[in-house]
Amino acid sequence: MSTALGELVDLLVGAIVDLGEGIASGVASFAKALFLTTDGTTGAVTGLSVFGGIIGIFGGVALAVGITTKVFNWIQSLGN
């Protein structure tokens, strides 16, 4: 009885692990195709795609605005 239960648990856990690995592989390849340009023959990453570059620029601007706002708020609080 315990060996059958053990095999059942191994089967269920193995299926969950395989499902998780499949999803992770799909998400990784989707993100790589969306944000990076690769060499067609070797698959080596050669740089950011246009979309990846735009996302990087907007992310940098958002970070700069956020940090600047925090700095200005801190400077204003010194007078209080």
Image (cartoon, rainbow, N blue to C red):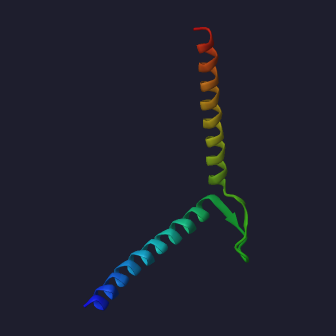
Looking at the rendering, which quadrant does residue 70 occupy? top right
Classify the position of the N terminus by image quarter.
bottom left
Is 79 displayed left or right of 7 in the figure?
A: right
47 shown above or below 66: below
Q: Name the residue: 59% across, 31% down.
A: 66
Q: Please give the count of numbered marks on the rendered protein.
A: 0
55 shown above or below 48: above
Is 2 displayed left or right of 38 in the figure?
A: left
15 shown above or below 78: below
Q: Position of residue 47 (x, y in %)?
A: 73, 59
Q: Residue furthest top?
A: 80
26 shown above or below 14: above
Looking at the rendering, which quadrant does residue 34 occupy? bottom right
Q: Name the residue: 56% across, 66% down.
A: 28
**Residue sitting nearer the eye, 12 or 61:** 12
Looking at the rendering, which quadrant does residue 37 occupy? bottom right
Q: Position of residue 21 (x, y in %)?
A: 49, 73
Q: Name the residue: 66% across, 40% down.
A: 60
Q: Name the residue: 64% across, 27% down.
A: 68
Q: Residue furthest front?
A: 2
Q: Position of residue 53 (x, y in %)?
A: 67, 50
Classify the position of the C terminus by image quarter.
top right
**Residue sitting nearer the eye, 32 or 13:** 13
Q: Position of residue 36 (x, y in %)?
A: 66, 61
